[in-house]
Amino acid sequence: MEPMSVKLYPVLALSLFGAGLWPFSAAGQGLSENVTEISGAASVLTSMTHTRIDRGTTTDSSSEPSLGISGNVGGQLQSGANSLALQYGGTFETERDLGDGEQTESSSVVGLSRFSHFDPGSRFDFNLGHTVSSVRNDTGFVVNPSDYDTQNTLNAGAGIRFYPGDLSTLRFSGEAGKSFGSGDLNNRESFTAASEFFRRLSQRSSGGINVSKSWSNDEDIDITIDSAQLVYSNLLENGSFRIGAGGSQADTEYPDGLVTESEAVTGFLGRTWLAPDWETSVEYNRRLSDSATDLSLELPADIEFIPDTIRIRDLVVSDSILISHNTSRVCSACNLGLAAEAALLESENTGSTTHEYFAEIDLDYQLTSLQRLALAYRWQGDAGEDAGTVIDQIHRFNISWIRQLAEEISFSVEFDQAYLRSRLARSDEEQFVLRLRLSKGFSLVGQPR
């Protein structure tokens, strides 16, 4: 499954846009005062991929050498009330099957950008966004994440604020989103109108109420969702606490004119503990939504990470709990990240119940001033109504050794392993990839106005 609200670790972002890219620094290169930071890298790579498929009585094996290029660019730009954040990356590889000599090509692009205008002295704000990601509309996993379909999404929204008192803020807003892609991915859109009232209760706490109405269209199915929620947040000396409770009601209209109604109690609970060298958070979330509605509900809060794949869902009531921990206490030269999530999803269209699980471990170790070792493990699993019986799962291991050759040039050796295990009518698979990568990067830092 995909983490629903995971704050992503730098190691994950690094592996997504090319595990092994050195965090280059060019202190002597300045930027305009409008640019906070721009960074990126380009790589040439060569790989050997070995895949095994268990057919029950026989095992099919194949080996494919490949050559490719990859690159990524990211940045944070600020000019007065205007800000732009972006992160894009892509890979192109050409492969040859050693068994039959067949030549194939594969490519993948992921990334997002967000522009926002917010002036505390003005009542108006607006935002624009673009996302390109890998999506899947089935419950299965694949050993190669780039095998999923690619979807582009455009978002836009605006809001107006009023101040009915020194301690209160009232905001009315509208958000729209539309997806572009092949097949069914090209026919999803939604719009959300919302009002938010917040009042500061003390120097550290605030409370309020959120009300929204969303309209979405997906494959000629129209869904309307009405939601209301009371919220409270408190900034503590060692972290933060937030809680919300409310309800949602949905009407689904099918192409034949049939209309069904759904409703659910919704809410969230979050607690974060912060210290100079570690951070721990626990989050619970219950919501009623579908993938088309999510296009306009809200923008991602953390641009540093983009999930490997995003699952397309129908109208579901989801309960999820996420626990994450980041620390540099393990040793003086390493960082450790842990995360685990479990979710229960009930389809309002089919009545089916599924359980989804996710676990992750990341360790980044600075061997010397010029060498770094990155270890990562990810596990994803799906279960049906029986939470204890995992019917589809995949294990991923990644080991990367990175050596800085010059100020802006690095060399890395990466070894990836993926193990697909399934109780469904499909074959188990294993894939092993050894990759050599030569990268050149840059990082330019300026001072915001």
Image (cartoon, rainbow, N blue to C red):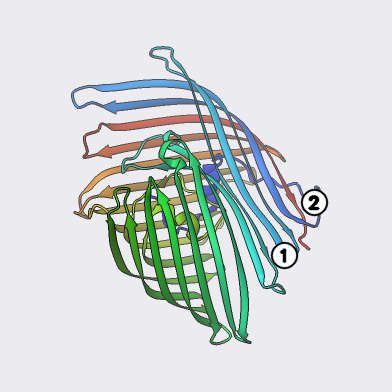
Disc 2 crowd, CA 10 A, few/some/many (<14, 14-19, 20+): some
Residue placed most toward the observer, 445 or 141: 141
Q: Where residue 81 is drawn, which disc sits there?
A: 1
As drawn, 250 above or below 367:
below
In the rendered view of the protein, which quadrant contains the C terminus?
bottom right
Residue found at x 41% / y 54%: 3
On the image, the x and y values in percent for residue 326 come to 49, 60
As drawn, 171 above or below 71:
below
Q: Is residue 236 visible?
A: no
Which amino acid, mark 1?
Ala
Which amino acid, mark 2?
Leu
Q: Is residue 122 visible?
A: yes
Q: Nearer the viewer, mark 2 or mark 1?
A: 1
On the image, the x and y values in percent for residue 125 come to 65, 66
Residue placed most toward the observer, 60 or 265: 265
Instruction: Name which of mark 2 and mark 1 comes first in the sequence.
Output: 2
Residue found at x 60% / y 67%: 159
Q: Is residue 244 left or right of residue 132?
A: left
SS for dot 2: loop
On the image, the x and y values in percent for residue 416 come to 44, 36
Q: Which residue is mark 2?
A: 31
Residue placed most toward the observer, 267 or 237: 267
Disc 1 crowd, CA 10 A, few/some/many (<14, 14-19, 20+): few
Residue found at x 56% / y 26%: 68
Q: CA distance from mark 2 to mark 1?
A: 19 Å
On the image, the x and y values in percent for residue 165 come to 61, 87
- Within the image, what quadrant is residue 338 found in? bottom left
SS for dot 1: loop
